[in-house]
Amino acid sequence: MLTIYVLFILGFILVIKGGDWFVDSAVEIAKISGLPKIFIGATIVSVATTLPEVIVSLTAANQGHTTMAVGNAVGSMICNIGLILSITAIFGIVKANTKDFRAKSAILVACTAVLIAFSYDGIIRKVEGVFLLVLLGLYMYSNIKMLKKNSEMKSLSKNIMVERKSLGRTMFYFVLGIAAIIAGSNLMINNGVVIAEHLGVPKAVISLTLIALGTSLPELVTGISSLIKGNEDIGLGNIIGANILNSVLVIGASGTVAELTIIPQNISLDLPVASLLTLILVIPAWIKKKVTRPQGIVMICIYFAYIIYMWKTALIS
């Protein structure tokens, strides 16, 4: 059992250091390309940090554990806003005054609504999984279209020519950071689940809390690193992008592998909490053009109330 704890701590260290390399290189990519940091966060960073969720949910669906696949995705959506973005908002200044934020947050609300609609009958069928992947394609297309419209893209090739050595080093640490985050996350997830089972924690709670938190560690580390380095907009873009990807990529890809069972708790508790947190984030940010400290406090209180309720209910039953 000692080895399990050692591997868990090793995973934690890898995630922390990987997140540091990851954010630094993402900021450098934004500088070299001339692209908005929130764009980088909502595309490159969010795709990379969502890889653990994709891998875990696909594996769970392939093995027939479809409720775990759904729980991981929805739990990660809750954790991303309720814990990670809340910490950033409480301790930093998160600006949301760009057209890019408004567009991507609107897409997030729409994708969440589609996910709820598909879940209402208690099952996400393969055709619905395919539809979610189509939405993913449209989302990525809109990002590419926005990229082409960027006025500073004309100087991209020139900047890369001038800073070829710098870009190569940046990309090396970007890839190294991704690898460290994924490896560390896997160590924490696998060994964390063993520790939890050894302590007698129900698996139903593990998928929506421990595994969801584990697969959200890249977003957590990215958010904290962004906060420390004064790049909160990278963290905001990452969370929005990650939640879009959780709803359409993670659920969509898992749904094409096997039909996903939606348990009553998903409909009565988990998805409503995810939706509530999304609206608390988006609507005030649209009005005030920033994510405020009071928002962060409200969201993190909802998150911990949800976690406490989940564990209390599980232990009583």
Image: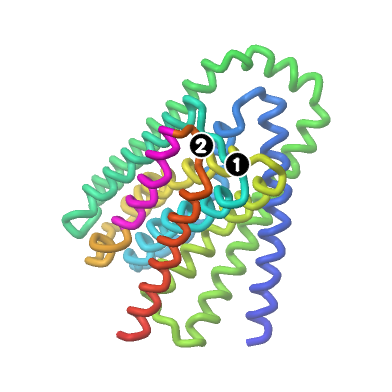
Residue 116's place in the image compared with 10, above or below, is above
Left or right of 6, for residue 83: left
Q: In this view, does 311 lie to the left or right of 165?
A: left
Determine the residue positioned at 70% across, 61% down. 14
Q: Which sits earlier in the primary sequence, circle 2 or circle 1? A: 1
Q: Is 284 one of the magenta-colored residues?
A: yes
Instruction: Identify which residue, 47 or 286, lies in the foreground.
Output: 286
Q: Quadrant of residue 147?
A: top right
Q: Identify the image quadrant of residue 103.
A: top left
Magenta residues span 271-287
- Asked whether residue 261 is in view, the answer is no
Amino acid type assigned to the residue bearing label 2 in the image: Lys
Q: Name which residue lies at 48% across and 83% down.
A: 197
Instruction: Report x, y in % for residue 89.
Output: 55, 48
Q: Is residue 178 visible in this depiction of the protein?
A: yes
Check residue 93 in the rendering and tell me which mark sits there, or answer none: 1
Residue behind mark 2: 290
User: Looking at the image, is 109 positioned above or below residue 53?
Assistant: above
- The crowding category of the residue bearing disc 1, from other C-alpha atoms within 10 Å (few below 14, some 14 to 19, many at least 20), is some
Q: Do the residues labelled 2 and 1 touch (CB within 8 Å)?
A: yes
CA distance for labels 2 and 1? 8 Å
